[in-house]
Image (cartoon, rainbow, N blue to C red):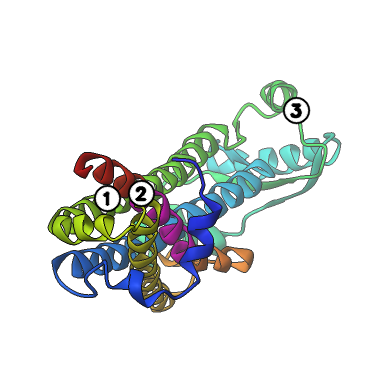
């Protein structure tokens, strides 16, 4: 169906005679309102998931790409010397912004979720960890591994590549699933409104026949259905969007402790996205109802 500007103008012009063509209440009206509200509610969460996943992928990519870890796996009597040797190498390594060995307290805090806060590091063969922060240029992991293997045999470099790629890929796929869900929700709205419009047209076949006898054109009749169903979808989607936004506001705020599950909200310009849902629902209803009305009117001719 081509975008009909006359039908769009008729959408905002009140015509009491045309409004009588479409029943103001009944099964089709309730179906349209409920479908638009329910799908808009789900669309808000799909958008929240997609936008939050995009932010997560970007954050994980940036944070993990700018850091690395060196593990000093050596006997206790050699661990301090090899740690100092690794730090000296890092001081002269291009691309390293800063490097420091984690203290016993910091390493114990990292292991506390698994072994408890009272665990003694001496009770386990825990390697000494060195935190490496890269600068803008980044370091050469291959060259650094060669230097470490030659001078610090107990050093193992982990540049987080094997951790970063799967995490970013998982977040990107979640974002894709969010947008795909939004498209499927739009298609479902179009299908349900099309069915409701066809049912309303079929139920009013006798009224349409009388209107034709008194000179009403198919375009006039179709515009009446387009206007009524578009406004129903707009109002239903607006109500569903408001409920969806309220539900998103009630979700826990983002935090480091909660991780991804506490960041499923909107941020910045992303808050404009849910308020586009009613307009998109109205556009879908406008196109779907127009196509269904013209098809049924041809069948009733």
Residue 213 visible in the picture: yes
- Look at the picture and state if 270 lies above or below 218: below
| Mark 2 touches mark 3? (CB < 8 Å) | no
Label 2, label 3: how far apart the Cα atoms are: 56 Å
Q: CA distance from mark 1 to mark 2?
A: 6 Å
Q: Is residue 207 above or below residue 20?
A: above
Image coordinates of residue 54 in percent, x first then y, are 54, 50
In terms of depth relative to the viewer, which is nearer, 3 or 107?
Answer: 3
The residue mark sitting in front, 1 or 3, is 1
- Mark 1 residue element: helix
Tell me whether the residue at label 1 lies in contact with that at label 2, contact meaning CB atoms closer than 8 angstroms.
yes
Between the residue at mark 1 and the residue at mark 3, the CA separation in whole angstroms equals 59 Å
The 10 Å Cα crowd at callout 2, few under 14, some 14 to 19, many 20 or more, is many
Per the image, label 3 sits on a secondary structure element best described as: loop
- Residue under pointer 1: 194
Q: How many marks?
A: 3
Q: Of marks 1 and 2, which one's residue comes earlier in the chain?
A: 1
Q: Is residue 165 left or right of residue 87?
A: left
User: Quick one: quadrant of the C terminus?
Assistant: top left
Magenta-highlighted stretch: main secondary structure?
A: helix
Residue under numbered circle 3: 140
Residue 47 versus residue 148: which sits nearer the camera?
Answer: 47
| Residue 142: % across, % down | 70, 22
Residue 228 in percent (x, y) is at 34, 67
The answer to whether residue 281 is magenta is yes
Q: Position of residue 37 (x, y in %)?
A: 30, 68
Q: Which residues are magenta?
A: 277-290
On the image, numbered disc 2 is attached to which residue? 288
């Amino acid at each position: 169906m081509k975008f009909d500007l006359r039908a769009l103008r008729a959408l905002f012009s009140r015509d009491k005679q045309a409004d009588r063509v479409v029943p103001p209440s009944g099964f089709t009206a309730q179906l349209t309102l409920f479908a638009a509200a329910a799908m808009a509610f789900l669309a808000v969460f799909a958008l929240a998931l997609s936008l939050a996943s995009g932010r997560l992928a970007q954050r994980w990519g940036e944070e993990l790409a700018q850091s690395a870890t060196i593990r000093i796996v050596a006997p206790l009597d050699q661990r301090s010397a090899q740690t100092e040797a690794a730090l000296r190498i890092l001081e002269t390594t291009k691309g390293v912004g800063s490097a420091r060995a984690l203290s016993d307290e910091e390493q114990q805090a990292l292991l506390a979720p698994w072994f408890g806060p009272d665990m003694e590091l001496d009770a386990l063969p825990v390697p000494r960890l060195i935190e490496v922060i890269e600068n803008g240029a980044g370091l050469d992991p291959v060259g650094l591994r060669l230097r470490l293997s030659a001078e610090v045999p107990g050093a193992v470099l982990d540049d987080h590549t094997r951790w970063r790629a799967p995490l970013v890929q998982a977040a990107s796929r979640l974002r894709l699933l969010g947008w795909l869900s939004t498209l499927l929700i739009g298609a479902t709205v179009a299908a349900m409104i099309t069915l409701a419009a066809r049912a309303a047209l079929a139920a009013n076949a006798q009224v349409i026949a009388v209107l034709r006898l008194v000179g009403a054109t198919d375009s006039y009749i179709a515009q009446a259905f387009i206007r009524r169903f578009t406004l129903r979808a707009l109002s239903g989607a607006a109500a569903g969007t408001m409920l969806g936004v309220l539900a998103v506001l009630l979700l826990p705020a983002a935090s480091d402790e909660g991780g991804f599950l506490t960041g499923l909200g909107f941020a910045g310009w992303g808050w404009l996205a849910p308020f586009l849902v009613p307009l998109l629902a109205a556009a879908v209803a406008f196109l779907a109802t127009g196509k269904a009305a013209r098809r049924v009117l041809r069948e009733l001719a």
